[in-house]
Image (cartoon, grey):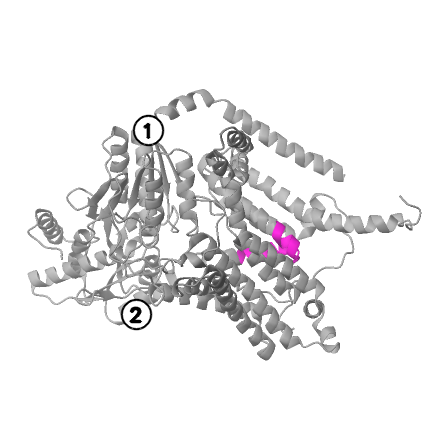
Amino acid sequence: MSATVPPIKPTEAKKTSSALGQALLVPILAVVTGLIIGAIVIVVSGASVAKAYGALFVGSFGNPLDFFAALKTLFASGDSAALIKAIYPFTESLVTATPYIFAGLSVAVGFRCGLFNIGAEGQFFVGALCSAFVGYSLQGLPMLIHLPLALLGGALGGGIWGMIPGYLKARFGAHEVVNTIMMNWIAFKLSDWLLNGPMKASGFRPVTPNIQASAELPRFFSDPLRFNLGFFLALLFAYLVYWFLFKTTLGFEIRSVGANPDAAKYAGMNIIKNFVLVMAISGGLAGLAGSAQVLGVDHWVGQGFSAGYGFDAIALALLGKSHPLGVVLAALLFGFLRSGATNMQSMAGIPIDIISIIQGLVIVFIAAPDIIRWLYRIRSLKAEETVLTRGWGK
Amino acid sequence: MKKFYSILAILVIASMALTACGGTAATPAPATEAAAAKLKVGEVTDMGGIDDKSFNAGAYAGVEKAVAELGVDGKYLESTQQSDYAKNIQQLVTEKTDLIVTVGFLLGVDTAKAAKANPDTKFAIVDYAYPDCGPDGKEGETCGSASEIPNVLGLTFQTNEAAFLAGYAAAASTTTGKVATFGGINIPTVTIFMEGFEAGVKYYNAQKGTSVEVLGWDSAAKDGSFTGNFDSTDDGRSFAESFVQEGADIIMPVAGPVGLGSAAYCQESKACKIIGVDVDWTVSASEYKDVILTSVLKNVNVAVFDTIKAAQDGSFKGGMYVGTLSNGGLGLADVAGASDELKGELETVKKGIIDGSISVK
């Protein structure tokens, strides 16, 4: 160490590192504890934990042995078929994580402004339907125009769906929790109607037509690998959200309103504008989650398009402490769990519901960190608590 | 103290892993030996899940019967969203499953794709068959295949035959002179129930000189009442309520679990009876036993079991299986409180349908 650098006071250094340590420690321990209790459930149901979690690992990351064997084949004979097979599970996990990242960011942005967006699921549907519509109805456009338009359609659709409860809250004080739930039901019923009526493809199946090839998010490998540009787009948006929240004046205003709306008002910030803006951004991100799913993976929308990404997103935002980086990590965790569950269900005969149990436990431990602190005897730091959402009225 | 707990946690995991390993290590030799000979069967459900009390459950009942009686290996994979279809099929293909049974028209495109990419794997799809491409269908996108696929057997049902019997029984049992039906979505596998039901009522009228009315379906217009989904029991309740207000006292909901909402309404109001579909509802929804008049049985389990049997003895062929009253693919459950006279009539009508002397159209 050079002499010109002023020495850091040991107590200070310890304080910051332990604060960061604890910020990470509780979520990690929550996940570990969730897995342990999940293991107990597996044992009680009479299956083998090693077989189940082994299958879960292979299902989400792939078999490392297969991977190295495939690499050898590639170098020896130039045959990449085995390698593509070996990376299939890993890429599928990233595919599953993609809508989770967008949807998690959506709820996280809301939390930062003290707003609880339960409507991500509805915004997800509206976004997916708008993207699908732009994707199949416009024809003959080059990809460079068509794909961005389809994404924009999804973001706008979801954004408007989120903005309505935001406006109702700002203008009339109607609580966003109630209104986003209402908007969810409107979205579900609307999609029922659209899929059986105006947006129905020819034939009897109640699904939209397939989108044009020019609106598809490009895939990096051939079938059955579905890994596509959407994942990197999700990472880009995570960075943009980070930059917006922490590096811009508007982002500062949003966080100020979230921390203390009265103080923010006295400081001359426009609360109404911020509520509407945040709900629009939040809805737009949830809409993009739907866009990424339809443009990158499914290419058509039918009933049961989502397995509840918008609701899982609430857990992701909590797990990620409403920080974009945390949300990305949480989304990857959920993506790998969900994707690996298929293999676990098949190889070990464990119902995929076990993953929901583990996810549920993780959420409980995150929502009530004192359980984890008590379990593992971690002393509580007087760190500032993020206000996630406010009660009625304010 | 903190250290103690973390060590304890690690020990707990380690011990679980070890005991688990011990458990699996005990039986590897016979398992691998038997696996070489055993036929591997896998089912991929649609979003209804394995306990939908309808065709997913029916198909798995067939698989379970085959496991017990034919000694095959059977398993299922549940789909929770549409992107799971291709993934679950791929999972079974990777495991070198011999026969993959997919359930429902929503898996039509993905099943065709996988079947074409893996011509050595046998496939069966419930309630669907190929070719399925209309004049403007795009293969692999809006439909599965423009031609028959040699390694896929479509399991379809001439359901109007059994629904015809249900319509006859309903017309004989109504006291208000009005019976009703509604569907989930206006698709052929649903409307075929409603068509047969209406035809059965009309046949009863022609035979007996009565004028029992059918609400909720109009064969001439090919349209009727639909909830637009297969999951909202609330819709089932409100549809039943409005049919009762219009004077109907027997309702046949063709919308999977939606019908349970109708059954709940009938039980509370005591104003109507329900005709179950797909499976015997006095068994699958026994809590509503007292309001179930009868059930239209679509024996998916029989079709799936027969398919597995054919795959095992080498007689499996692609194409189309059609379940009818005569081959046991269809049936009508016992009619609650039916007189011997009605029972006899139903038997006669059934014979008539089988020998072709009664048209169910």
Please give the residue where the numbered disc 2 appears in the rendered image: B242
Left or right: A368 as drawn, with respect to B295: right
What type of secondary structure mainly makes up the magenta span? Answer: helix
Residue A113: quadrant of the picture: bottom right
Q: Residue at x 43, y 44 (%)?
A: A223
Chain label for disc 2: B
The C terminus of chain B appears in which quarter of the rendering? Answer: bottom left
How crowded is the residue under tag 2: few (<14 C-alpha within 10 Å), some, or many (20+)? few
The N terminus of chain B appears in which quarter of the rendering? Answer: top right
| Mark-to-mark CA distance, 1 and 2 | 49 Å
Q: Position of residue B170 (x, y in %)?
A: 18, 59
Amino acid residing under circle 2: Ser
Amino acid residing under circle 1: Gly
Please give the residue where the numbered disc 1 appears in the rendered image: B71
Magenta stretch in the rendered image: A311-329
Q: Is residue A41 visible?
A: yes
Q: Residue at x 63, y 42 (%)?
A: A32
Q: Position of residue B147 (x, y in %)?
A: 24, 46
Q: Is A45 situated above or below A146?
A: above
Q: Is A80 situated above or below A293?
A: above
- Residue B320 in the magenta stretch? The answer is no
- Front position in the image: B136 or A206: B136
